Image: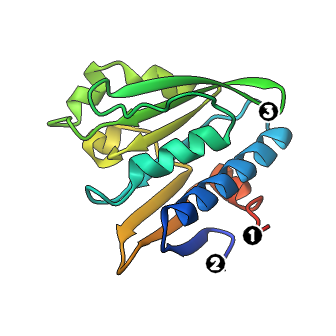
Amino acid sequence: MTKTPELLEQHCRQETDTAALAQKLAASISRFLVDHPHQHLNISLIGDLGAGKTTFARYLIQSLGYVGKVKSPTYTLVEPYQLTINKQAVDFYHFDLYRFADEEEWEAAGFREYFNAHSICLVEWPDKAGDLIPQADIDVYLSLAGEGRSMELQANTTVGKQCLDRYTDS
């Protein structure tokens, strides 16, 4: 694992590696929320079809404590999850904007309110919302690489950097 304050890179040969990376990110989010209990966090998942965005999202949501089936929001556009992290209720919204034809659909869908509350927003295909969507605190880049996937976590904001500073290899 390559680590700098703003960028983490890992090659995932198997799905268990993807799960482990999601678990580590979930742990860093939990530690971050201890110090910043009402902080909003935006995470973007960026990658081609089949790169593992939804799989990563499922492992992240489950690692944050959700018990139950994590559904893909491909057709519903957003799936809400009520989580308890560090004894506090946290709304978690998983978006999939793949089906958007243009960025105006994001505005028309009324999603802006989700990004103004104490919540975590995880967005697949954020580019479909153009400049209308708030900047991600953390971008997760996923790509097919040989017999596995390459994954990079990049902090874009002070909040994202503070969160990734809590990421550990243990």
Name the residue at 49% across, 51% down.
56
Q: Is residue 82 above or below residue 134?
A: above
Q: Is residue 132 above or below residue 80?
A: below
Is residue 142 in view from this perspective? yes
| Residue that protrudes farthest toward the left in the picture | 101
Residue 162 is situated, as x and y percent measured from the top left of the image, at: 73, 55
Q: Earlier in the sequence, mark 1 or mark 2?
A: 2
Q: Secondary structure at mark 2?
A: loop
Cα separation between marks 1 and 2 = 8 Å
Q: CA distance from mark 3 to mark 1?
A: 23 Å
Element type where label 1 sits in the image: loop
Neighbour tally class for label 2: few under 14, some 14-19, many 20 plus, Cα within 10 Å: few
Give the distance between the C-alpha atoms of the residues marked 2 and 3, in whole angstroms: 28 Å
Q: Quadrant of residue 145?
A: bottom left
Q: Secondary structure at mark 3?
A: loop
Q: Is residue 110 left or right of residue 18?
A: left
Residue 155 placed where, x, y %? 58, 60
Q: Relative to 41, is 110 above or below?
A: above
Label total for image: 3
Which residue corresponds to the image point at 34% horizontal and 37% vertical from the top-left?
96
Q: Which mark is residue 1?
A: 2
Instruction: Tell me which residue sits at (51%, 68%) in the image.
Output: 152
Q: Amino acid at mark 1?
A: Asp
Mark 2 or mark 3, earlier in chain: 2
Disc 1 designates what residue? Answer: 169
**Residue at the (66%, 43%) spot, across then down:** 63
Which picture quadrant has residue 81? top right
Residue highlighted by disc 3? 37
Mark 3 neighbour class, 10 Å CA radius: few under 14, some 14 to 19, many 20 or more: some
Look at the image and tell me in which quarter the N terminus lies: bottom right
* Left or right, 87 with reference to 69: right
Q: Amino acid at mark 2?
A: Met
